[in-house]
């Protein structure tokens, strides 16, 4: 039976591989001489990571060819300037085994089960229990313990806590793709954007980043509703959540950070939802809703519906994920959408809760990763890591952001950058569309954010990046009530905890029902009572596993 299962998995892998080889030649020069149990890559160091030339520089004279498993890429990728430069500099070429997102999980699991991954894996939707299982089964090749040969990559391992959580039996088998969208601290970027021009119209001399209490914030919303500074009548929405009612439970973490998770009390984990602060959050949001400060049908909103209302000029405040790139895009969109609106008319609120602190969570450090098949040679691993390290240099980040130096852009004497193309040039089919289309190449290693803070970047404004985003983060840092991500619990896989996951996922729906109800306490308590026994089973397993 096991033989039949293996044969079927192998056949499925072949069928899937043939069907998804878009943009690839399918002819790769794999070096299969490295066995699953060969741990030689663990000893790669700055002194021995590559062959050294006479001048003690890396020797890339051996031409390498390999394949990458990814959802990103195209047949034209090899011709893009940044990709072509990397291939020439590091003397390699690659094909891409492109897989559509719709069947990514299925294909990934099939290739893992049959040990059929290509040499490099640009991994999306990493499932932690699967990652651990596959690492222990020998699907992946461990990364070097000494990363000093790749200082830019090493710096990421030292800065972000996620790397420690991906260690399996003392080895790192996948390198997380980091989001560098907040260089100031580890706080997530869910912020309160507000119409500063409307505040001024109501006689309020508010700063770009206005510091207020929660009660003062509610008073501001009521003032907006009463005075209607935008003269919108019944179209006015004083306060919008990015995703309408779907954001309510997430916002409730201002009161109960563990409302849809587990809370540590006296050294033991318990279900977070029953904590009294959950009901406090429900009542606060219900007050906003009942007082007409939220859109009355927003509990049915699709994702981004609340944000779209704010961008269209209907909302006074929007609570949303506003990393620097999104914040800049928000400002640009509002300038284009709203007659007379200027960039400086956008502001941020920093809101102190009842304890006088700013309640903030840890930013999402990453999504996706890159890894190597167990049969990948040391030479290919080293070459790919060297490419990733190179792409993290400022010079390459500038090419990612602006295109070819001197041809696509120039740096002026004052440090500013002049772009030698228009917005139409970089759209698909435009003369310079490679500037945008080549960006997935860097995405093999790291995610968004680095280009936003480049000196002289014409795509960002000093007002948005410094007066708004930076000031907001620095204000929070003066007195935070900080809740870090609990990777130990989040990445733990046990039978009862996995069974309880669907109930945790339904927390937001029950939260919405409680807000809309005439008896919010009764609705919420029924949710808690109905699921408490299953929660206790999950917590018993969590406490048993984490006590080992």
Image (spheres, grey):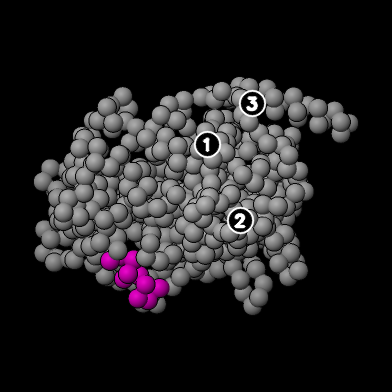
Q: Secondary structure under badge 2?
A: loop
Per the image, is 34 magenta? no
Residue shown at 77% from the left, 48% from the top: 37
Work out whether mark 1 precedes mark 3 in sequence or the reverse, and give the earlier one.
3
Q: Nearer the viewer, residue 150 or 465?
A: 150
Rounded to the nearest angstrom, the CA distance separating label 1 from label 3 is: 23 Å
Residue 282 place in picture, x, y as percent: 45, 61
The segment highlighted magenta reads 471-480
Work out whether mark 2 precedes mark 1 in sequence or the reverse, and give the earlier one.
2
Q: Which mark is drawn over residue 48?
A: 2
Per the image, is 473 magenta? yes
Label 3, on which residue?
17
Q: Is residue 150 left or right of residue 17?
A: left
The residue mark sitting in front, 1 or 3, is 1
Q: Which mark is drawn over residue 92?
A: 1
Residue 331 place in picture, x, y as percent: 23, 49
Residue shown at 26% from the left, 70% from the top: 211
């Amino acid at each position: 039976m096991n033989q039949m299962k293996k044969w079927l998995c192998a056949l499925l892998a072949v069928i899937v591989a043939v069907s998804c080889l878009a943009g690839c030649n399918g002819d790769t020069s794999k070096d299969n001489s490295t066995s699953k149990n060969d741990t030689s890559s663990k000893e790669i160091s700055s002194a021995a990571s590559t062959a050294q030339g006479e001048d003690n520089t890396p020797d890339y004279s051996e031409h390498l060819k390999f394949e990458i498993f990814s959802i990103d890429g195209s047949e034209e990728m090899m011709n893009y300037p940044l990709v072509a430069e990397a291939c020439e500099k590091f003397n390699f070429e690659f094909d891409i085994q492109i897989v559509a997102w719709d069947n990514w999980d299925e294909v990934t699991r099939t290739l893992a089960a049959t040990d059929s991954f290509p040499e490099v894996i640009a991994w999306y939707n990493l499932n932690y229990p699967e990652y651990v299982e596959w690492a222990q089964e020998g699907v992946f090749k461990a990364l070097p313990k000494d990363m000093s040969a790749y200082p830019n990559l090493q710096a990421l391992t030292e800065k972000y806590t996620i790397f420690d959580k991906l260690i399996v039996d003392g080895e790192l088998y996948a390198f997380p793709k980091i989001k560098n969208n907040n260089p100031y601290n580890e706080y997530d970027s869910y912020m309160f954007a507000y119409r500063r021009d409307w505040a001024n119209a109501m006689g309020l001399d508010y700063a770009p980043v206005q510091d207020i209490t929660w009660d003062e914030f509610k008073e501001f919303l009521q003032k907006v509703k009463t005075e209607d500074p935008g003269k919108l009548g019944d179209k006015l929405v004083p306060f919008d959540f990015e995703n309408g009612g779907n954001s309510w439970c997430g916002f409730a973490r201002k009161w109960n950070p563990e409302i849809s998770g587990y809370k540590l009390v006296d050294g033991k984990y318990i279900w977070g939802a029953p904590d009294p602060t959950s009901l406090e959050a429900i009542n606060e949001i219900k007050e906003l809703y009942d007082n007409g400060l939220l859109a009355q049908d927003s509990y049915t909103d699709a994702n981004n519906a609340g944000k779209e209302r704010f961008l269209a000029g209907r909302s006074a405040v929007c609570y949303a994920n506003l990393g620097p790139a999104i914040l800049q895009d928000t400002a640009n969109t509002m300038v284009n959408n709203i007659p007379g609106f200027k960039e400086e008319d956008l502001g941020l609120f920093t809101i102190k809760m009842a304890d006088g602190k700013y309640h903030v969570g840890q930013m999402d450090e990453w999504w996706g990763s890159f890894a190597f098949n167990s049969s990948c040679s040391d030479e290919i691993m080293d070459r790919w890591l060297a490419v990733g390290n190179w792409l993290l240099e400022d010079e390459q980040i500038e090419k990612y952001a602006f295109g070819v130096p001197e041809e696509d852009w120039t740096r002026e004497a004052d440090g500013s950058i002049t772009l030698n193309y228009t917005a139409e040039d970089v759209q698909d089919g435009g003369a310079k569309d490679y500037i945008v289309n080549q960006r997935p190449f860097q995405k093999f290693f790291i995610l968004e954010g680095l280009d936003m803070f480049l000196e002289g970047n014409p795509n960002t404004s000093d007002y948005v990046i410094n007066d708004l985003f930076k000031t907001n983060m620095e204000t929070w840092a003066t007195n935070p009530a900080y809740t870090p991500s609990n990777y130990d619990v989040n990445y733990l896989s046990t039978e009862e905890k996995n069974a309880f996951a669907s109930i945790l996922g339904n927390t937001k729906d029950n939260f919405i029902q409680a807000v809309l109800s005439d008896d919010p306490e009764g609705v919420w308590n029924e949710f808690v009572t109905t699921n408490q026994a299953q929660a206790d089973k999950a917590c018993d397993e969590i406490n048993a596993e984490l006590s080992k």
